[in-house]
Structures are given as C-alpha cells and as structure tokens.
Amino acid sequence: MKYIYFIGLLWILFSSCSDFLKEYSQDQAYVRDYADLDELLIGETYMETEFYDMNLTHAYYPYIHLMADETQENIESTGWGIDYSWFQKQYFGYVAWQYRVGYHTDKLTTSPEDTDWNKLYKHINLANMILYEVDKLSAENDDEKQAISRIRGEAYFLRAAYYFTLVNLYGQPYQPASAATALGVPVKTTPVIEDKMFPRESLETVYALIIQDLEHAATNLEGIARKSIYRANLTAVRLLQSRIYLYMQNWQNAAKYAQLCLDLQSDLIDLNTFDGTSKAFADASSPEIIFSMGGNDISALITTYWKGLSASEDLKACYPDGDLRKQYFLKNDEEAWVDLYMFCNKFVRKERTYNANVSSNFLFRTAEAWLNLAEASAYMGGDNEKKAREVLDLLHEHRMEYYDATTLTGDDLIEEIRTERRRELCFEGHRWFDLRRYNVCEKKPFTGTIRNTYTEFGDWQTASTTYTYELKAGDPAWTLQIPYEVIQFEELTPNPRNERTYISILQFN
C-alpha cells in the first residue's frame, strides 16, 4: 500500500486512523512572515495545554501513570452516591498489560489504540513544515533574525521530544549493544511529497535524529531569553539532552548535559520553609519549573472521592520518616467521611479541583537535572560517586526535616538514587519509562516484579471480584504494541508482546 503525502501550511487533519503520516490542507493559505509560523507553532505544534476534569478525551497518554506501580484501585468510595471510576474499564488493556490494549474486559468491545500515535505524529508533521518554511524567511533586522532562530530552535526541540516519547512508548528500551537492530518507530523529517511507505527505523537511527535535533535546537536557542515556561528554551534543551543520554546509558554525556542545565537553572524549593497553604508544590510560579506542555490529568485519575485510583501503598511506603514530600506530594482527604486512600496534591492543593497549571506528563524541573547528574555519576563509579552523594544530600536538605549524610556506594547508591527519583518525580510521567530502562541497564538491571489489579463491581456498587496481573522484568509487555489500527493499514512490524491472564483472583462475599 502506498500513500501520497500532501503538505498543508496552517491546519492539519487526519482523515482516518491509518493516516499517521498523511497530511491534508483545508485551504491554500501561505506563510507570509515569521509571525504566521509562530502562530502555527503555538497553536498546533505544542501539545494542547487544557487541563482536564473527568473528560480525558484530549489528554496525552494518561495511561502512562497507570501501567507502573504508582497507582492502586480504590475498592470503596469515600463519597455518597458516586459510582466507581470508569478509568479502570477504559484503560484495562494498559493496566493489565494486554496484547491488545484497546480491548475492554469483555474482550468484545474496544477503544482506539492509535489516538496518541496520531497526535504525536501530527505534531511532528507540523514541526517538519515549520522547519521547511522558516528557512525560506529572510530577516530585516536583529529582532526578526532572533525570532526566526527561536522558531527554528523550538521546532527542532519539539520534534525531538515527540520522537523521544514515541520511541519510548512503542520502541524497545535502549541497549547500546542491540540499538542498531532493535526496532524503534517510523521517521519522517521532510514536508515534501513522498510516494513511499515509512517502515520502523532502528533505535540507533531514531536516537541519532533526536540527538541531532537537540543540537540544532541548542544552537538556535543559545542566547535567547525564555518567553514563558510553556515555550522551550535552552535550559529545556539541555535537560532533555541529559535525559536522552541517560536512557542511552551514555553516562558521561548524561552528566555533562545535566550540569549544563543546572548552570542555567538550579533552584530547589526548600520544603522546610515552603508555604503550602496558598499553592501546590508543582505550580507554574515555582523556581524549579523549566518547561511544561500538555495538560494535567492527575486530579481526575488519582482521587479518593469515588472508587477509582489512588496513590499506591508501595509508593507511599518509599518515603522515609521526616520526608516532607509525603505531605506535599501525597495527601489523605481530610474531608472524607472515611480515611482510606491517598490522592496526589502535588499539582493542586485539594482533589476534585482541576486548576493545575503545569503538565503531568511533560514537565521539566530542576530536580530531574540534579537526579540525572546523581544517577549518571553513580553509574560511572569511582570518584564520581562523591558527586552522586553530594546531590542526594542536597535534595534531602531541601525535602526532609532530618536526614543522615549519604555514605552509600556501588549498587546500594544506585538503588537509593532510583528510589529518590521515584519519590521526587512521582506522577510526572517518569516512572514507567524509568522502569523500562532499568530493565536493560548494564549497571544493576531491574529484576523485580510489579502487579496491578482490576476489580469488577456488582450490585450496590460493591466489589465482587478482583483480578491480579503481574509484569516481570524482561517481559515483552514493557513495550506497547504498535496500535492495532496502524498495523492493519501500515503493515508495520509488530512488537513481540504476549497475551496474558491474571495470576490470582479474589472473590468477595
């Protein structure tokens, strides 16, 4: 099957679920100047920034928070007359790591599997067009020259960010020894008409493009002031470069770019003096925020008000005594008539309000840069471990009422940094990706197991049966299957994801 790719300049629509690289124009408008490209960049190339209540129609991959070990089911409701959340049914295939993530529990009805695939490729196509058109523009003064450079830099950054997200959802975890042959995702970087199919490229090819795009982004954004936290700047580029190299197990470059990021912005909030009565920890005004795009679905997903999902006991248990994040990141509902579960108050002070002003799946903070530096330093070992310990102590100083100076070495130091990353970056979209890369890490690979449950409810909204599903280290299900709709129409090579069933069942009286 072959496809013709036609370029539209100001508006892109997908005509069917199979057209993830197919583009259409509704009109024949032309780019007149850099202002037109800037409008296209803001309005269509960045992720939508609306924030969600119970309607997650426009959310970006909300299941990223449900596949790992950060959430658990609420079997009982803390509110009167509230039906249990439909999130478990809607995302059952993700929560239980099914071969077909779109299947509902009855294995008869389905939800679309290619929603995020199409969204991300749409943004990539728009970035491709902007990069093509911006090179046609000429600048008459320094202001215009800087504006053109900024637009080019942001477009390169966004294209890199979207390919990074796609390859970590649908590509294998990166292993240096196999990256040249392991499958990533299809790549298209030009807006020209191409009568061809786009196969899955290797991880090595996809990551090489991401690195190259970020280098171009850094060159173009150098010296340009940040417009807002919702627009990419050089600091965001440096942090993403650090993250990329960390995923690639290139420890030297991961540490290098983390430090370059911190040279630009390094502030940490001290929770010992933080006033949490007026705003949440992760707020747009925070000195830790580097960049944010996309909406925030946590207040809808993680709730104690109805039967749905809450912060897991496992996550709660990883915070030691004296850790103030347990107060400012996770919270019991003090107004509930029964104190059962914990919600996430990291983005909003109280649940059942949806006024978060930063993203829950694409948020860049200085804390991640510090953790990237610590983790890369620990992996390099030797004298570098001193830097890793210093960073941990710095974080503990800002997050805990009391702590002992870090003396750990070797694997124990690595494990503590991973746990610290889990504590610090919870519900920001990191945990699933982190567990994936720990699976294949050459230094202390993950060998554990995570478990999720799915509960059916009977009369009077009471729990009737709970099924437990298990995901072990090395299981192919750490990588999502290529969406069913895409495999059917694009003939892409599928991932070796297994069928699975529950490992245990609990029936209630």
Image (cartoon, rainbow, N blue to C red):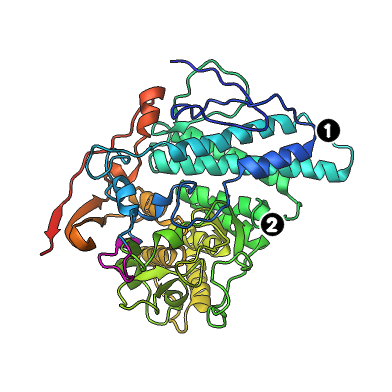
* Relative to 90, residue 484 above or below: above
Residue 278 visible from this viewpoint:
yes
Q: Position of residue 213 (x, y in %)?
A: 61, 39
Image position of 123 with respect to 82: above or below: above
Kindly identify the amino acid type of the residue bearing the numbered disc 1. Answer: Ser
Q: Quadrant of the N terminus?
A: top left
Q: Nearer the viewer, mark 1 or mark 2?
A: 2
Residue drawn where x is 44% and y is 47% of the image: 61
Question: In front here: 230 or 237?
Answer: 230
- First in residue order: circle 1 vs circle 2: 1
Could you tell me how far apart the alpha carbons at marks 1 and 2 are, in whole angstroms? 25 Å
| The residue positioned farthest toward the left in the image shown | 509
The span picked out in magenta is: 71-82
Q: Is residue 174 visible?
A: no
Using a 10 Å C-alpha cutoff, classify the residue at mark 2 as few (fewer than 14 neighbours), some (14 to 19) or many (20 or more). few
The numbered mark at residue 482 is: none
Identify the residue shown where x is 45% and y is 52%.
55
* Image quarter hosting the C terminus: bottom left
- Which residue is the site of mark 1? 138
Q: Amino acid at mark 2?
A: Ser
- Residue 414 in the image: x percent, y percent? 39, 63
Who's the residue at 27% across and 46% down the image? 474
Q: Quadrant of residue 149?
A: top right
Q: Which residue was labeled with disc 2?
A: 228
Mark 2 residue element: loop
Outermost residue, right direction? Answer: 141
